[in-house]
Image (cartoon, rainbow, N blue to C red):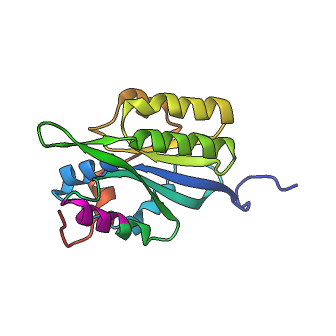
Amino acid sequence: MAVIGSGSTPAYRPSMIFIDGGYLREGIKKVFGHYNIDFAFLPLLLDWSTMGGPIQPELIRVYYYDAIVDHKDTKYDEQNSYFERIQENNDYEVKLGRLIKTKDGRYRQKGVDVLLAVDMITKAFLNHYEIAVLLGGDGDYVDLVKSIKDFTGKRIVGAYFQENVSKRLADSFDGGIILSKDFLGQCILTTKSE
């Protein structure tokens, strides 16, 4: 039996990334004025030092959750192109809720948080991952994170915008990756798209 210590072979841990797409787009747009994201960069979220020791995350899959308007809506083709571009990346899966138009003409997501939560907890219980990165900031995820940690022993790392995260959520993670302008600069494409 190998003893883990300095100079030992790293222990690979199956890992998954769960992305709240609306949260990511809103944060990127606030920082850069657009959300033209190089999604091939996002697996680098697993390249962090908060775990310490010889743990080496091995990416199994990235799940991206967002919402799309009804196919009859004029914005459908534009949104669908955006999601198809994400899906072109290996190891990515896009899961979509729906957008509902409110009386004031704005759109509101329906079902996205539930899709993310069901997948994250189900995959934890099925041992599909040992380490998960949750890119999101909504305080509604606190119970999800705590349940997975308490009942499965999985490690959950948060990736979030410092100025837009529930303190309770940030405190519930095993480690955190702050999505700063410097960090995010690597994942922004030069051509803007609105």
Question: How many marks are shown on the rendered structure?
Answer: 0
Which quadrant of the view contains residue 107? top left
* 79 falls in the magenta region: yes
Which residue is nearer to you in this view: 109 or 120? Answer: 109
Q: Residue at x 42, y 50 (%)?
A: 19
Q: Position of residue 84 (x, y in %)?
A: 37, 68
Q: Residue at x 30, y 68 (%)?
A: 81
The correct choice, above or below, for 86 with respect to 117 in the image is below
The answer, for residue 47, to whether it is visible in the render is no
The correct choice, above or below, for 140 with respect to 90 in the image is above
Q: Residue furthest front?
A: 72
What's the magenta bit mostly, secondary-structure-wise?
A: helix
The answer, for residue 188, to whether it is visible in the render is yes
Which quadrant of the view contains residue 171? top left
Q: Position of residue 194 (x, y in %)?
A: 17, 62
Q: Residue at x 53, y 37 (%)?
A: 174
The magenta-colored residue range is 74-83
